[in-house]
Image: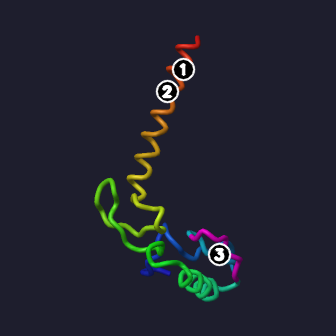
Amino acid sequence: MAGVFRPLTGPRVERLAQDDFQVLGLRELSPRFRSRERAERWMAEQLERVTPARKPRERCCLRCGDRFLSEGFHNRMCDPCRHVSDAVAMGVAQQATAKVRRLAG
């Protein structure tokens, strides 16, 4: 469907196969649905149960300040910043491992 915006993060309906849809981005694992409409209806019902503070919404990234669609209360950094932080953390872990090996060696 050209021209329809579908987020890459947060609650969303994804096509798994020809007539097989699933809701991703929620804490609860969704069942599989035969139509996108049923999956979207199920997702809306699940989101109604979530407290307002935990609902997916647009938030400001804690690292860069850009606005992004948050997956929920736990998600406070945009994807690019989260990936940078992951890479930095991995580099720190690798350096620490190398230092321990040198000292043990």
Earlier along the polypeptide chain: callout 1 or callout 3?
A: 3
**Which residue is drawn at the image coordinates 46% and 73% (left, top)?**
56
Residue 55 among magenta residues = no
Q: Name the mark nearer the viewer: 1 or 3.
A: 1
Pointers 1 and 3 in contact (C-beta within 8 Å): no
Task: Give the CA separation, mark 2 to mark 3.
Answer: 41 Å
**Which residue is drawn at the image coordinates 34% and 57% (left, top)?**
62
Task: Give the CA separation, mark 1 to mark 3.
Answer: 45 Å
Q: Which amino acid type is shown beneath numbered disc 2? A: Ala
Quick one: label 2, few (<14), some, or many (20+) residues within 10 Å?
few
Q: Position of residue 74 (x, y in %)?
A: 48, 62
Callout 1: SS: helix
Earlier along the polypeptide chain: callout 2 or callout 3?
A: 3
Q: Which residue is mark 1?
A: 100
68 with respect to 8 (left or right) = left
Pick the front one: 50 or 63: 50
Mark linked to residue 22:
3
Q: Which residue is mark 2?
A: 96
- Magenta segment's dominant SS is loop
